[in-house]
Image (cartoon, rainbow, N blue to C red):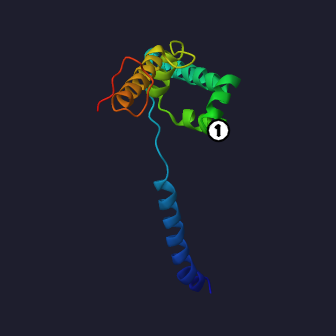
Amino acid sequence: MKKYVVRYVGKPLCLLLALCFLTVDVGIRTAHAGMISTETVLAAQENGDARAQVMTFFAREDVQQAMLTQGVAPDEVAARVASLSDAEIMQIANQLDHLPAGASLGTVVGAVLFIFVVLLITDIFGYTKVFTFVQPVR
């Protein structure tokens, strides 16, 4: 009776266990240890600080209110900031202190100049009468 059990049950059981051991071994990864330079550690710390600075900026009440007026939810802003790369975060953090609170002067001057040119052209073609120094084309 013993030979019968070993012959018909033992062989498939051994094959099953061998297959299990082979599949378990495939998933194991080896660890590679190495020296980390000081610059790498400092860069990682700076990236973490920059990310925290940007998140703090977007967490301010006035910034969130401005984002809501533009139609962007605060949780969406947090998700987008979290998805930025380290280089993009560093660029935003470096420019954060130098950005104007509202529109820059160049944007305002450009908008005023654009409106002036549009009104001037409409006065020349006789559609409006805004400027007195313009003679309409007849």
Q: Nearer the viewer, residue 71 or 17?
A: 71
Query: In the picture, which quadrant includes the N terminus?
Result: bottom right
Which quadrant of the structure image shows residue 82? top right
Residue type highlighted by circle 1: Ala
Where 76 falls versus 16 (above or below)?
A: above
Task: Determine the residue located farthest toward the front in the rendered image.
Answer: 138
Residue in the picture at 55% in, 74% down: 13
Which quadrant of the structure image shows residue 123? top left
Q: Residue 37: tell me if it is visible.
A: no
Residue in the picture at 47% in, 45% down: 29
Q: Return the x and y of residue 92 as percentages of the image width and height.
A: 49, 22
Q: Nearer the viewer, residue 8 or 90?
A: 90
Residue on which disc 1 sits: 73
Where 62 falls versus 12 (above or below)?
A: above
Query: In the picture, which quadrant includes the C terminus?
Result: top left
Q: Nearer the viewer, residue 131 or 37?
A: 131
Q: Return the x and y of residue 2 as percentages of the image width and height.
A: 61, 82
Q: Nearer the viewer, residue 54 or 100?
A: 100
Describe residue 123's horizontal placement relative to residue 82 as left or right: left
